Image (tube, rainbow, N blue to C red):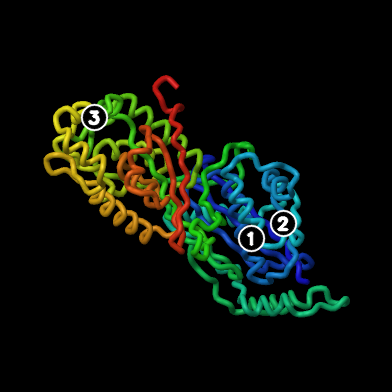
Amino acid sequence: MPSFVVEADGGSRGNPGPAGYGAVVLDPVTGETLAEAAEYIGVATNNVAEYKGLIAGLRAARDIAPDASVRVRMDSKLVVEQMSGRWKIKHPDMKPLAAEAARIFPRSAVTYEWIPREQNKHADRLANEAMDAGKRGKQWEPSRSTAALDTSAARAAAEEPRTVGDATAGAARARAALAGAGAGAGAGAVSRAATAETPSGAPSGTFPTGSAAGRESDARPQPETDAAGAPPVGWAATADLGTPTTLVLLRHGETALTPEKRFSGSGGGDPELSPVGRRQAEAVAAALAARGTVQEIVSSPLRRCRETAEAVAARLGLDVRIEEGLRETDFGAWEGLTFAEVQQRHPEDLAAWLSSAKAAPTGGGESFTSVSRRVSAARDRLIARSPGRTVLLVTHVTPVKTLVRLALGAPPESMFRMELSAASVSAVAYYADGNASVRLLNDTSHLRAGA
């Protein structure tokens, strides 16, 4: 059985901040570099970057020899102890990362060892190269001095029987494959035994240089991660366990109309955030920055959403893209009225609206059926544009409820059974097999004024 050493590291310049990882696969006897991997991953925390480095290193080793035994060496005490099973993984957002790493090889094939940071310089260098590339708006590419490994030759080398007198007979074949091989390029590039990861866009701006060290505590709360490896949602479909496209759904902060529960759509005025709403936007921006996984921001064109999105974008160093399909329902003549006022002035129209998704508000408003078509078309465009990425959608009550309803396969009348607080967050992960997974995070008590 072939054996490898995997050294991995990750860092964040700000924690959370611009982050990257590095990993290297080594011959355990000669110390020869068999594969390298690195990627700039956008805004994330140290621990997320470290886990992603571990995953990349294990994948690179598996692509060389799926039946190998692996000794992982890292300077992250948290990752080593959690993956060794000695520390519990308490934070729910860390569990998917650990589970993803654990699935790459059989548990019995991998051991973990903590090493001092100064002994992890190779992986640390790769992580810094990835972050430096991200600073330039690019992704990491193997340097000219690092030869690329031909995957097929490496696999053949790893599978070659070894004799007692030559413990590195297979590694010798792998080293021979290094000569003259061209270095691969691209995001999460591996030099070149593992498949490159999906590219992450680099935010604009100038980031400080320096080591991937300078971490804060490993015990820091972890960012939200994609639900990789989630069980199948549909009963009949074959589950796609790959990386989903995750839409994080953020309702805008309060306006003056919100606490009065007045209809506020896209057909009336375009109110700005109230002082409370601005505080909510700043609070949710800080919370999303701490989670560290949002890679893109898309907003409804209405002012209250744009102001909320801009508060988040300022924290994450990202741009805001406008999507017309995410605007709120046009409530026609009901704009600015309370439910009681509509019931008094337009009782028959309100009754029809409550009983049928095809009924529109008085005065040429939009039906829920029309909104559903518009929102689902916007959803499909976003998924096609950003496969495998985490995209923040700053939008309104009806679009958020619509996306959740469609993901759950719930009937239109379920729209009236959902409560959605201002500045609340939900998420839907979309898989390539058509299934979806919904996470509801509607507690916004920490966003209230004075909290």
Residue 53 in the figure: left or right of residue 298 = right
Residue 238 image position (x, y, % from top left) = 52, 65
Judge by depth and name the residue closer to the eye, 241 or 238.
Answer: 238
Q: How many marks?
A: 3
Q: Earlier in the sequence, mark 2 or mark 3?
A: 2
Q: Secondary structure at mark 2?
A: strand
Give the structural element (helix, strand or loop) at label 3. Answer: helix
- Disc 3 marks which amino acid? Phe
Does the CB distance between marks 2 and 1 fall below 8 Å?
A: yes
Query: Which image quarter: residue 308?
Result: top left
Residue at image mark 2: 72
Compute the Cα span from label 2 to label 3. 61 Å
Residue 7: x, y in percent?
68, 57
Q: Which residue is mark 1?
A: 57
First in sequence, mark 1 or 3: give its number.
Answer: 1
Which residue lies under the disc numbered 3? 339
Label 1: how many Cα within 10 Å (few below 14, some 14–19, many 20+):
many
Asked if residue 389 can be seen in this view, the reply is no
What residue type is disc 2 on?
Val
Q: Earlier in the sequence, mark 2 or mark 1?
A: 1
| Residue density around tag 3, few if under 14, some if 14–19, many if 20 or more, within 10 Å | few
Q: Residue furthest left?
A: 363
Residue 350 in sight: yes
Q: Amino acid at mark 1?
A: Gly
Percent position of residue 122, x then y: 65, 57
Q: Nearer the viewer, mark 2 or mark 3?
A: 3
Which residue is at 67% across, 64% downward? 25
Real-space CA distance between mark 2 and mark 1, rounded to the nearest whole angstrom? 9 Å
C-beta proximity under 8 Å, tags 2 and 3: no
Q: Quadrant of the N terminus?
A: bottom right
